[in-house]
Amino acid sequence: MARLTIGNLAKRTTTKVETIRYYERIGLLPIPGRTEGNYRSYAEAHLSRLSFIRRARDLGFSLDQVRELLGLADKRDRSCEAVDLIARQHLVEVERKIADLASLRDELTDLIGRCRRGTIAECRIIETLAPASAQGTA
C-alpha cells in the first residue's frame, strides 16, 4: 500500500486531522515517519490502528479503555479474558446510562403531561424548573 498523508488518513477513517494529531500526542497512534518535504507519512498499520480506535470510540469506550484494548490487541497470544472484562464493565456503564435516560424520559413525559397550554404565568413546566425561592417571581 502506498503511504498516506494525514488528510488521506483522515478521509479514510472519517477522523478529523486535529483528532489524529491528538491521538499521536497522547500515544494512542504512533508518530509517523516524515517525507523529504517534512510531511507526515502514514502506513497501513496507522490506518488499521486508527480504524480500531475510531470503532472503539464509536462504541463509547473511553480513551483509557481504548489504550488498554490496544495494549491487549498487540499481545495476540494472550487470553482475551481482560478484553472481555473491559467490555463487560463498559456494558454495565451503558446499561446505567440507558436506565438514567429512561428515567429522564419518564420525568419529561410526566412534566409535559401536566401542561395546560395556558399562559407562561401558569405554566407547570416553568414552575417545576424554577428554584423554590423563585417560583413566586416566575
Image: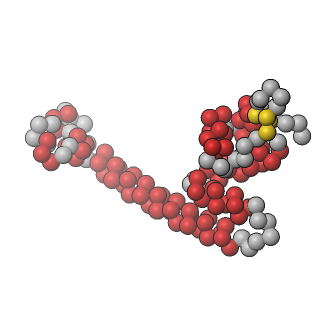
Question: Residue 71, relative to residue 137: is it above or below?
Answer: below
Q: Residue at (44%, 61%) from the top-left corner?
A: 99
Q: Is residue 74 visible?
A: yes
Image x and y of residue 82, in percent: 66, 70
- Residue 9 image-quadrant placement: top right
Question: Residue 112, relative to residue 76: is it above or below?
Answer: above
Q: Is residue 51 visible?
A: no
Q: Which quarter of the image is occupied by the C terminus?
A: top left
Horizontal side, residue 7 vs residue 18: left or right: right
Q: How many marks?
A: 0
Q: Residue at (76%, 65%) from the top-left corner?
A: 75
Q: Residue at (61%, 47%) from the top-left corner?
A: 26
Q: Residue at (46%, 58%) from the top-left corner?
A: 97
Q: Nearer the viewer, residue 45 or 102?
A: 45
Image x and y of residue 42, in percent: 79, 39
Q: Residue furthest top?
A: 37
Image x and y of residue 134, in percent: 14, 41
- Residue 80 image-quadrant placement: bottom right
Q: Residue furthest right?
A: 1
Q: Nearer the viewer, residue 98 or 18?
A: 18
- Describe the colour scheme in one phrase: secondary structure
Q: Nearer the viewer, residue 105 or 39?
A: 39
Image x and y of residue 15, in percent: 66, 38
Horizontal side, residue 53 vs residue 134: left or right: right
Horizontal side, residue 1 vs residue 8: left or right: right
Q: Residue furthest left?
A: 136
Q: Which quarter of the image is occupied by the N terminus?
A: top right
- Residue 13 image-quadrant placement: top right
Question: Residue 55, relative to residue 19: is it above or below?
Answer: below
